[in-house]
Amino acid sequence: MNASPGTRASDSLVELAARVVPLAAFLAFVGAWGRTLPVLGEIVVVGLLALTVVAAVHHAEIVAHRVGEPFGSLILAVAVTVIEVGLIITLMVSGGPGAATLARDTVFAAVMITCNGIVGVSVLITALRHGTASFNTKGTTAALATVLTLSGLSLVLPSFTTSVPGPEFSGAQLAFAAAASLALYLLFLFVQNIRHRDYFLPTSPPVVRPLSSVVEQAVRARRTGAAVTEHHSARGSGAALAATRVGETRMTGVEVHAAVPPLGTTMISLGLLITALVSVVGLAKVESRTIEAAVEAAGLPHAVVGVVIALLVLLPETLAAARNAYRKRTQISLNLALGSAMASIGLTIPTIAVASIWLESPLHLGLGATHLVLLCLTAIVGTLTVIPGRATLLQAGVHLTLCASYLFLAAVP
């Protein structure tokens, strides 16, 4: 079915904005570098920073749609992780009392927001529209197990190791944790996109058909010599094929029925993607002092800076997950949520580990007692949610309560 003129006009405006925003952000970065901006200038730069994050993921999706899987998922993950790491490193380089814990605060914020916030919103939307949210237990339990293992290895163990005092790894321990995290994340990509791809596709309800229709099909099949075989409905099969074509580890904003973009469009998006990534890192450096000063002026803990970074980076994934949940594609929403958590740990921790060689600030990764309790609750609740393969408003409310508790305790520890 062809899109309406209004839809085509809206898509054209979105594409135009996605091309203009990275260029405007780059010019703003060049113009603002080394200067003290007025209040209005600060507001404009912050707005451009948020819009450029969304534009970067949009162009990453186009490139990913062109190259296909499993490289598409990897491109999406790397693009968003570059933004996250760039924000973390620029703020760590600027120093300050919270520089040592910024990486931990940002990664843990990403885990809590994805595993509770995005999961809760996705289940809530689907349950409100369709009663219950159904998903594939094989893939979802495997993804949750990977997220919990990565979280325990990178964020829990540093609080209990004894080689170095404080909640940090020794050099050898950090190298092992970084290598293990990266290897486990790459293994998950292989399983999700190649070995057991069907585990991560949306489930299709069984087709209930009148007996007369079945008899009629049997008679027709007997006449033509065709075997009578029951398959999934066309709608379910279409959703499964669409999910196969779209990268599900980080954000999937490309419509599943969209044609593969031509080479020229892909190259333009690649150039704009690089421009957007450079602009985000540059604007983050420009605004680093302002962000920290605003948090301090509000009387909030420095950990709130990590929450702000995580919310900014995960905004595109949240919108995509909500859109898929509205269309009763809960499995894709869960793939986005858990995949984002995985990439945040599996790619960010190794990158920060390498960067720590040149950074003067120590790297504190171990969680405190409050965050350990929240992580344990998330693990228990998440397991109980995904095992049945169906979730209701109650599960959505529990996850959203955990997310709200984390955000509140981040501001009021």
Image (cartoon, helix red, strand yellow):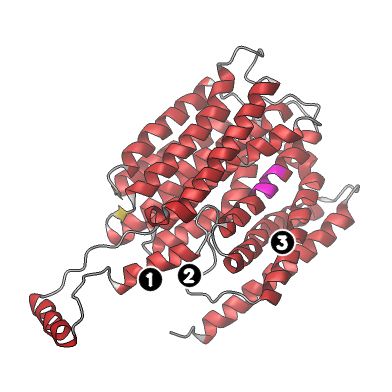
- Residue 238 is marked as 1
Identify the image quadrant of the N terminus: bottom left
Q: Are marks 2 and 1 in contact (CB under 8 Å)?
A: yes
Q: Amino acid at mark 1?
A: Gly
User: In the image, is 363 to the left or to the right of 107?
Assistant: right
Question: Residue drawn at (57%, 39%), measured in percent from left and top?
Answer: 183
Q: Is residue 119 above or below residue 252?
A: above
Identify the image quadrant of the C terminus: top right
Q: Amino acid at mark 3?
A: Leu
Q: Secondary structure at mark 3?
A: helix
Question: Residue drawn at (49%, 66%), measured in percent from left and top?
Answer: 245
Residue at the spot of label 2 = 256
Residue 9 at x, y percent in the picture: 59, 81
Q: Residue furthest right?
A: 34
Name the residue nearer the viewer: 129 or 272.
Answer: 272
Give, as a single range, the part of the protein colored magenta.
81-85
Residue at the spot of label 3 = 273
Q: Is residue 346 visible?
A: yes
Q: Amino acid at mark 2?
A: Val
